[in-house]
Image (cartoon, grey):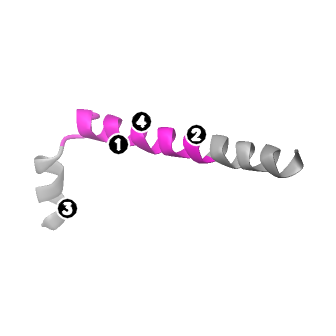
């Protein structure tokens, strides 16, 4: 019963909020990667 309610409530198409959350997560990962790269370069220099 709960599964049917969630299916009717939220269709399977991508919503703007999901896309925005995914973009924010990707930006955070890229920022962490760049910060770790710059920190590593600073340690080497």
Q: CA distance from mark 3 to mark 4?
A: 28 Å
Q: Nearer the viewer, residue 13 or 30?
A: 30
Which marked residue is nearer to the observer: mark 3 or mark 1?
1
Residue topped by disc 2: 30
- Tell me which residue sits at (79%, 46%) in the image: 42
Q: Tell whether 2 sits left or right of 31.
A: left
Q: Tell whether 27 sits left or right of 36.
A: left
The x and y percentages for residue 38 are: 72, 42
Q: Nearer the viewer, residue 19 or 6?
A: 19
* Helix, strand or loop: magenta stretch: helix
Q: Is disc 4 placed on a helix, strand or loop?
A: helix
Q: Is tag 4's residue or tag 2's residue first in the polypeptide sequence?
A: 4
Q: Is tag 2's residue or tag 1's residue first in the polypeptide sequence?
A: 1
Mark identifier at residue 21: 1
- Tell me which residue sits at (11%, 49%) in the image: 9
Q: Is tag 3's residue or tag 1's residue first in the polypeptide sequence?
A: 3
Q: CA distance from mark 2 to mark 3?
A: 35 Å
Q: Is disc 2 placed on a helix, strand or loop?
A: helix
The x and y percentages for residue 24 are: 40, 40
Q: Is residue 38 visible?
A: yes
What crowding class fits label 1: few (fewer than 14 Cα within 10 Å), some (14-19), or many (20 or more)?
A: few
The x and y percentages for residue 39 are: 73, 49
Q: Quadrant of residue 14?
A: top left
Which range is magenta?
11-32
Q: CA distance from mark 4 to mark 1?
A: 5 Å
């Amino acid at each position: 019963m709960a599964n049917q309610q969630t299916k009717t409530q939220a269709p399977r198409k991508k919503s703007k909020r999901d896309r925005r959350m995914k973009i924010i997560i990707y930006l955070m990962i890229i920022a962490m990667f760049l910060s770790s790269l710059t920190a590593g370069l600073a340690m080497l220099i």
